[in-house]
Image: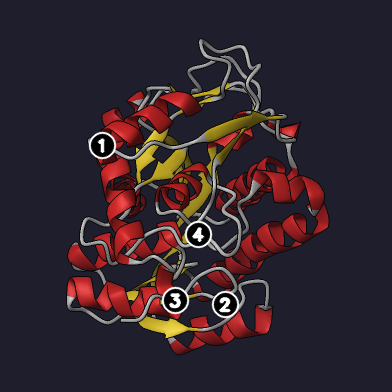
Amino acid sequence: MAILVTGGAGYIGSHTCVALLEAGYRVIIADNLCRGSAKAIKRIECITGKKPAFYCLDVTDAAAVDGLFAANKIDSVLHFAGFKAVGESVAKPLLYYYNNVVGTMVLAGACQKYGVQHFVYSSSATVYGPNKVPFREDMLLLPAANPYGETKAISERILTDAAKANKGWSVVLLRYFNPLGAHESGLLGEDPAGVPSNLMPYITQVAAGKRERLYIFGGDYNTPDGTGVRDYIHVMDLAAGHVRALEKTKSSPGVHIYNLGSGVGYSVLELVRTFEQVTGIAIPYEITGRRPGDIDICYADPGKAYRELGWKAGKTLAEMCRDAWRWQQANPEGYATAE
């Protein structure tokens, strides 16, 4: 039996594939490579010594997904495939609703047809919206700040209702916060196409001289230094959380929701200063207007994940900066760097 990882050639998915393979699972990756890289799959094999099976397909393609399920004995699904940029979702809401929601529906339908009862969903802290921090799993969801958050909340509801309708299903919804860093080998990392929409790859590109300065969106938030506060988590800690979540689906039917975060909020400027301290490189920056859909402060109450999964974030902000910089130095053009 195999674990199907959708979006396994992307940033979080590829690191989770490493964690799964190292834990002894057999992995099948499904990815259309529109935002992932085939080289990431080769590097997963290089790190683990194990080659995951790979299907180049789009999870919104019901016929292709059905063919994959028909051809393989799949035990569980870890669903990462989806678009994730808050700002882009505001500009292109229909793209996000179609890709993120339809993909979830297609996968849930295939699971129902082929008797796959274990499902781990890659959700997001954006479903909380402007709630009072720290965010807890029992809060009323307020995702309307941006379409991306709405697609995550809708997908959560779809999977929750599917689990209610299918006896024996176990669904884990993982609401994670802001992943940073890279695999310690420097072989896997975040490789955005074009101008990075996430903070850390933009910082590392400035440090590498690829960009003149960092643009910080908003300096008038209700925070100690005026810049947005976020809960940052190392991508390998996040990957470990997915392995624990998969284990949870094997022992406990129903729907389970967990925050994956450190429980500590850092401002954008605090992150920049930490990166400077770790690397010894000054990061020039300019504060500009706020970005549509962003909120002031976002950090987790991660206690439930610790109590029920035995998981907690272990790596520091300095380690996140160190590993992200190692990835950038080793791969100045991302996966396009010659091997």
Q: Is residue 50 above or below residue 132?
A: below
Q: Which residue is mark 1?
A: 278
Amino acid at the residue labelled 3: Ala
Q: Quadrant of residue 76?
A: bottom left
* Residue at mark 3 to residue at mark 2: CA–CA distance: 17 Å
**Mark 4 or mark 1: which is in front?**
1
Amino acid at the residue labelled 4: Phe
For marks 3 and 2, the one nearer the N-term is 2
Q: Nearer the viewer, residue 21 or 199?
A: 199
Secondary structure under tag 3 reads helix
Residue under the image location 47 percent in, 48 percent down: 206
Which dot marks residue 106?
none
Q: Nearer the viewer, residue 108 or 277?
A: 277
Which dot marks residue 80?
4
Is disc 2 in contact with disc 1, using a CB cutoff of under 8 Å?
no
Q: Is residue 247 visible?
A: no
Q: Quadrant of the N terminus?
A: bottom left
**Mark 3 or mark 2: which is in front?**
3
Q: Is residue 45 visible?
A: yes
Q: Which residue is mark 2?
A: 32
* Residue at mark 3 to residue at mark 4: CA–CA distance: 22 Å
Which dot marks residue 336?
3
Secondary structure under tag 1 reads helix
